[in-house]
Image: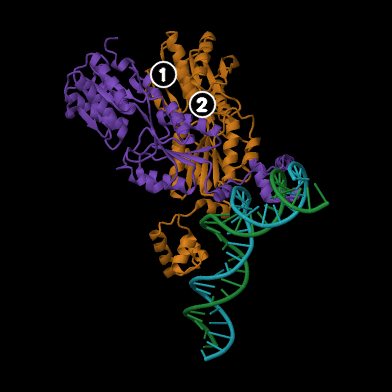
Chain colours: A purple, B orange, C cyan, D green
DNA sequence: GAAAATTATGCAAACGTTTGGATTATTTTT
DNA sequence: AAAAATAATCCAAACGTTTGCATAATTTTC
């Protein structure tokens, strides 16, 4: 591996000049800069980023920490962030926590210890609160997205969760469903708290009462949705607003099993616009969160040094599962 | 940030002893080792991995380079590899190339420059050959999986592509389909070459001839599958073996559009067992590749220093799309 | 109890880069 | 042509760790 010292030796100058030349520092003459660039090219020089990062106390890595990579929502967020960050010269590394905040702490500490330029975080669902985050990352710049801790300072990119859930629930009401329950997700996460609030607001705005008996908590994966939907049926529901698409899918499993017709007898709306929602039979109505844009917004927030909260709108996509009045 | 020098100062010993103590080197007395460990704990010491990596010329990072993270096949590979590697003390970083080998080269160089302990690679489909890989990574240990370059030496983990495609095609024959075409994928990739070979073997083994007019190349995504299936219909096909699930999905789009009944009038088998194949209507028969196990195998191959090729079996999952004789 | 063997620690260099301040070379000013 | 100002380069330290070799401390051997 060629080093800047090798280049310096070959040109009869010092490593510091080579370093400055490569960095485009105006303190070095145009002529020598070109000579250095050419020699570097010839000798196949590539910067030792480890040495560089050590000396600078900072890397060009941006770490993205998310619950799971195989959720289209998250992989699209990554896509958006990656595009912007790569253009700005950063390398993106992705860490998944599988919803374990212990794993998340490890990932965060790791990134801090690699002197990441920034960390983009969407926290694990089992996190009790956000205290551990700051402890884990020290003063590494933090951009939270989607699942954010309100008590952890710094830039935040969130979906219009309350508004979105309001739209979804209002839609179910307009379609004529009488008893609309909710698969609420985890109340440890602000995003789900807000979705539930939107659900409630829509009900109460339509003169209906909020009934906690038909709100099913801790629902996040397909199996939970399946079990919760069974209870919802017993409780006399004829529709469910689901705070995730996977729980909506699980609910559909349960309904099909019982021979309940969707949307005629039962309405369903999910959240996230996962690709499969357009493939199931019936197709599933859902809330799209514009994840690619959220990723881009996170990247720009970092690059521009923003520390405010940005809200990205959610869009209701009406498909078959809730479209009773065709 | 506390350093080993801080700990050394606090204990009246030297950094070298602290370093050895933390590394569990037997050259340091048990007593001082415990003192160091306790002081490190007290002072909240965390190793500066950048400095450590620089000195050692090697990091504890394993890079996984794949075309896309939002393919269940790949995200499950990652899951398997991550589990094994984390237990062995490595940090996994994931890079997606989006099927661009230019992006892949950047990712590989990057990992080399970060002195990655190993790179796990499933190459981009547009790669002309494997020459660039060795150039990009130098002597970083390389484990190729799924999409491998036969001419690039080192450990390889591959699916039993030929055998799998043989099983899938034989199944279509047994189901009574007369004219079975193929969505073959890209012939730049060994995996797809072998799948096509398995398809051909099955046809010829059943006394049928291989007809290149009903083999559709460069099919990888849904849209390609849609277009190719239209041509397949014109060419009189009544079944397709698809070397990917997304192309099978596209084919289904085209068939539905034309009002062709699946599986009665047309049979489909995909490859990869993406989650959605069990959700569509009809559900899609497919080949499962045991991705989690492939990821684990890759990790073990690295940890054990293996350099041979391991073949992971493929399993035919018969669902509705090919099950004519119910 | 001195020599030898063993154990524990210290010293100093190295990894490759970056950067503040010093030095030398060049240009401008008077 | 000397002084002053500017430009270009060099020097040397620093980032925090690891590690071969040297030294010091302790234990064993005779």
- Residue A230 vs residue A149, the one in the foreground: A149
Depicted A28 relative to depicted B241: above or below: below
Depicted A325 relative to depicted A137: above or below: above
The image position of residue B238, as x and y in percent, is 48, 13
Q: Which mark is residue B165?
A: 2
The image position of residue A292, as x and y in percent, is 45, 27
- Residue B190 vs residue B98, the one in the foreground: B98
The image position of residue B75, as x and y in percent, is 45, 34
Q: Which mark is residue B223?
A: none
Q: Are marks 1 and 2 on the same chain?
A: yes
For label 1, the residue is: B321
- Residue B134 vs residue B113, the one in the foreground: B113
Helix, strand or loop at label 1? It is: helix
Q: Chain of mark 1?
A: B
From this viewpoint, is residue A279 visible?
Answer: no
The residue at 35%/39% (across/down) is A124
The residue at 44%/28% (across/down) is A76
In this image, A296 relative to A177: left or right? right
Quarter holding residue B293: top left
The Cα–Cα distance between marks 1 and 2, rounded to whole angstroms, is: 16 Å
The residue at 40%/56% (across/down) is B44
The quadrant in which the N terminus of chain B is found is bottom left
Helix, strand or loop at label 2? It is: helix
């Amino acid at each position: 591996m060629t080093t800047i010292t090798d280049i310096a030796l070959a040109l009869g100058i010092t490593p510091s000049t080579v370093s400055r030349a490569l960095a485009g520092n105006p303190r070095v003459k145009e002529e020598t800069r070109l000579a250095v660039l050419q020699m570097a090219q010839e000798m196949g020089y590539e910067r030792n980023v480890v040495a560089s990062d050590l000396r600078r106390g900072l890397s060009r890595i941006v770490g993205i920490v998310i619950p799971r990579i195989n959720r289209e929502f998250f992989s699209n967020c990554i896509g958006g962030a990656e595009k912007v960050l790569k253009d700005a010269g950063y390398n993106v590394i992705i860490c998944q926590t599988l919803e374990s905040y212990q794993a998340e702490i490890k990932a965060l500490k790791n990134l801090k210890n690699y002197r990441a330029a920034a960390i983009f975080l969407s926290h694990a669902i089992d996190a009790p609160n956000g205290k551990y985050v700051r402890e884990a990352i020290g003063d590494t710049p933090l951009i939270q997205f989607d699942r954010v801790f309100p008590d952890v300072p710094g830039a935040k990119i969130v979906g219009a969760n309350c508004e979105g859930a309001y739209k979804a629930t209002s839609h179910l009401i307009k379609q004529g469903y009488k008893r609309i329950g909710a698969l609420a997700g985890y109340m440890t996460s602000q995003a789900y708290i807000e979705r539930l609030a939107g659900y409630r607001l829509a009900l109460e705005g339509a003169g209906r009462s909020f009934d906690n008996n038909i709100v099913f908590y801790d629902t996040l994966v397909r199996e939970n949705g399946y079990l919760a939907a069974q209870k919802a049926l017993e409780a006399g529901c004829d529709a469910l607003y689901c705070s995730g698409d996977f729980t909506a899918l699980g609910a559909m499993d349960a309904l099909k099993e019982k021979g309940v017709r969707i949307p005629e007898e039962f309405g369903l709306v999910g959240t996230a616009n996962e690709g499969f929602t357009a493939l199931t039979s019936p197709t599933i109505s859902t809330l799209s969160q514009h994840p690619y844009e959220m990723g881009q917004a996170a990247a720009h927030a970092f690059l521009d040094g923003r520390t405010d909260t940005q809200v990205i709108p959610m869009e209701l996509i009406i498909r078959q599962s809730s479209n009773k009045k065709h």
